[in-house]
């Protein structure tokens, strides 16, 4: 969850008079191993508490992710990829790597347009910490050839494409491409802020000709890349 900005003046003495809502636009860029992303978002948040330090709200975000020769592994169902599948607790489940196959997408490029949920806290008039995550939306992007690998055997998949539907279901239950950020924002003045970002980014591609056949006969055509990236963002609050 994230919270981006409240419409407050940079003055500690005015917290009781500050508006109870805030809105802002933000541009962010991140980089990781053999990949990167950019994101443009709009957020509308409500402030809570006597001093309006806590914020929560919703937003919309377009994330563009790109890379070169990225590995995507089996994207579920979760009962095949994790040792247990309890929602939320699945983050602590073991990885069943023996059930994973891999595709290496030669030129991935995914655009994910999602609704976000945001949560954050004002430590003081200038420093704000927050979290945001995509909830639901749609993806489109570049089709690409890929190399499919299973049990040490490689074959060519002529056409892989981004999974079209995105939804947050927690962990390996998720579907599609989803962006999430932990960040600290420093408020330069009443409008402009600068963010330091840690990003956890899921992107997903589907095969069109080759399918993975699991040990129980399940046929799988979705494969996921999980990236831990770092970056910067700049925001403007109204």
Image (cartoon, rainbow, N blue to C red):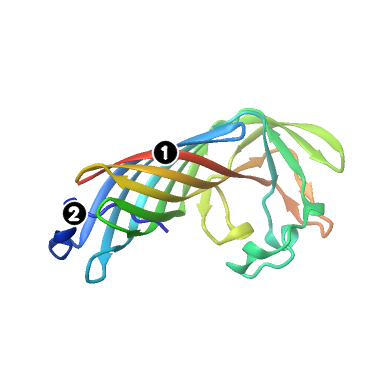
Q: Name the residue under label 1.
A: 232
Q: Is residue 88 left or right of residue 83?
A: left
Residue 232 appears in the rendering: yes
N-terminal label among 2 and 1: 2
Residue found at x 56% / y 61%: 170
Looking at the picture, how far across and down is residue 64, in whole percent? 47, 36
From the viewer's perspective, is residue 11 above or below residue 150?
below
Looking at the picture, how far across and down is residue 65, in whole percent? 51, 36
Q: In this view, does 140 lie to the left or right of 99?
A: left
Residue found at x 14% / y 60%: 14
Q: How many labels does the image show?
A: 2
Residue 8 shows which numbered tag?
Answer: 2
Looking at the picture, how far across and down is residue 235, in whole percent? 30, 42
Determine which quarter of the picture holds residue 129.
bottom left
Q: In this view, does 142 lie to the left or right of 127?
A: right
* Neighbourhood count class around disc 2 (C-alpha, 10 Å): few under 14, some 14–19, many 20 upward: many
Residue 102 shows which numbered tag?
Answer: none
Residue 4 appears in the rendering: no
């Amino acid at each position: 969850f994230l919270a981006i900005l409240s419409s407050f003046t940079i003055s500690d003495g005015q917290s009781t008079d500050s508006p109870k809502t805030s809105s802002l636009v933000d541009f962010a860029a991140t980089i990781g191993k053999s990949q990167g992303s950019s994101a443009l978002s709009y957020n509308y948040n409500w402030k809570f508490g006597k001093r309006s330090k806590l914020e929560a709200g919703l937003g919309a975000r377009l994330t563009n992710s790109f890379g070169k020769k990225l590995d995507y592994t089996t994207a579920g169902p979760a009962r095949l990829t994790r040792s247990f599948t309890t929602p939320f607790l699945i983050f602590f489940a073991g990885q069943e790597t023996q059930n994973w196959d891999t595709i290496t997408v030669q030129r991935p490029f995914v655009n994910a347009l999602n609704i976000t949920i945001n949560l954050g806290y004002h430590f003081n008039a200038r420093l704000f910490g927050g979290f945001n995550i995509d909830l639901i939306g749609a993806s489109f992007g570049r089709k690409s050839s890929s190399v499919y690998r299973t049990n040490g055997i490689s074959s060519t998949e002529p056409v892989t494409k981004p999974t079209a539907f995105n939804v947050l279901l927690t962990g390996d239950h998720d579907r599609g491409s989803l962006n999430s950020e932990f960040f600290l924002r420093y408020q330069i003045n009443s409008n402009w802020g600068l963010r330091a970002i840690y990003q956890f980014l899921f992107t997903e591609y589907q095969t069109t000709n080759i399918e993975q056949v699991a040990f129980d006969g399940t046929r799988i055509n979705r494969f996921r890349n999980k990236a831990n990236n770092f970056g910067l963002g700049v925001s403007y609050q109204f």
